[in-house]
Image (cartoon, grey):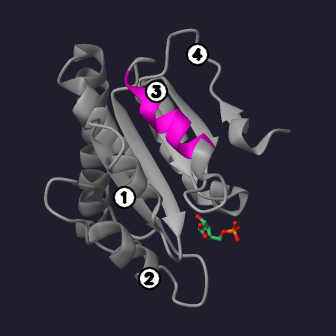
Amino acid sequence: MNETQIVTNERTSAPLVGILTGSPSDLAVVEKARTTLEELGVPCELRVLSAHRTPDLTLEYVRSAEERGLEVLIACAGMAAHLAGVVASNSQLPVIGVPLAAGPLSGLDALLSTVQMPSGVPVATVAVDGARNAGFLAARIVARKYPDVRERLQAAAAVEIKRYEDIATDNQKPPTS
Ligand code: RP5
């Protein structure tokens, strides 16, 4: 399989969110962004594209993203994580960075590389391995334009609130034994 085209979701509608990651070794974590977006009904695509190993392919993808209809880009990378910065400097789309806990520094290196961007080239950086929140944030961005996504986000939040209310209620019950 071509590593630059590892996963495309099966939706018929055009992707709104492009997810990039620097290595096939990242995919176990990065897939969480894709599944989150799919749960929320946001069409997306996932590509393995490296700022270091495949710079030309990465730039080609990023520079054509907006005209292909993408509205948000999620860039995930570990260690010397330059991918999100390169993406943000080659597109005016909003970019969400996901630092990954690869290598001996457990993601601190990627966190600093991703978050410390110069003024005018922003990367909205989520937590180390925060691929699920990257999906939620991308969905919140596109929800400004697509009310059905906003409704799904509200429904997902309501499920979580109910779950924690149930836990709190259970905690207040006296022990059975
Ligand atoms: C980063 O370096 C990748 O995103 C990955 O997290 C890490 C290791 O990359 P590979 O050696 O697996 O290509 O660029």
- For label 3, the crowd category at 10 Å Cα-Cα, with few meaning under 14, some 14 to 19 and many 20 or more, is few
Q: Amino acid at mark 1?
A: Gly
Judged left or right of residue 101, residue 42 is left
Nearest-to-viewer mark from 3 and 4: 3
Seen from the viewer's position, the closer of residues 127 and 113 is: 113
Looking at the rendering, the stretch of residues picked out in magenta corresponds to 57-66
- Residue at 27% across, 44% down: 162
Q: Which of the numbered marks, if any, corresponds to residue 64?
A: 3
* Label 4 lies in ligand 1 vicinity (Cβ under 8 Å): no
Distance Cα–Cα, label 3 vs label 4: 20 Å
Residue 56 placement: quadrant: top right
Of the numbered discs 4 and 1, the one sitting upstream in the chain is 4
Position of 80 with respect to 118 (left or right) is right
Q: Is residue 18 above or below residue 137?
A: above
Magenta-colored segment: predominant secondary structure: helix
- Rounded to the nearest whole Å, what is the CA distance between mark 4 and mark 1? 29 Å
Asked if the stretch drawn in magenta spans residue 144, the answer is: no
Q: Nearer the viewer, mark 4 or mark 1?
A: 1
Looking at the rendered structure, the secondary structure element under dot 4 is: loop
Q: Amino acid at mark 4?
A: Arg
Q: Earlier in the sequence, mark 2 or mark 1?
A: 1
Please name which of the two marks, 2 or 4, marks the residue nearer to the observer.
2
- Residue type at mark 3 is Ser
- Comparing marks 2 and 3, which lies closer to the viewer? 3
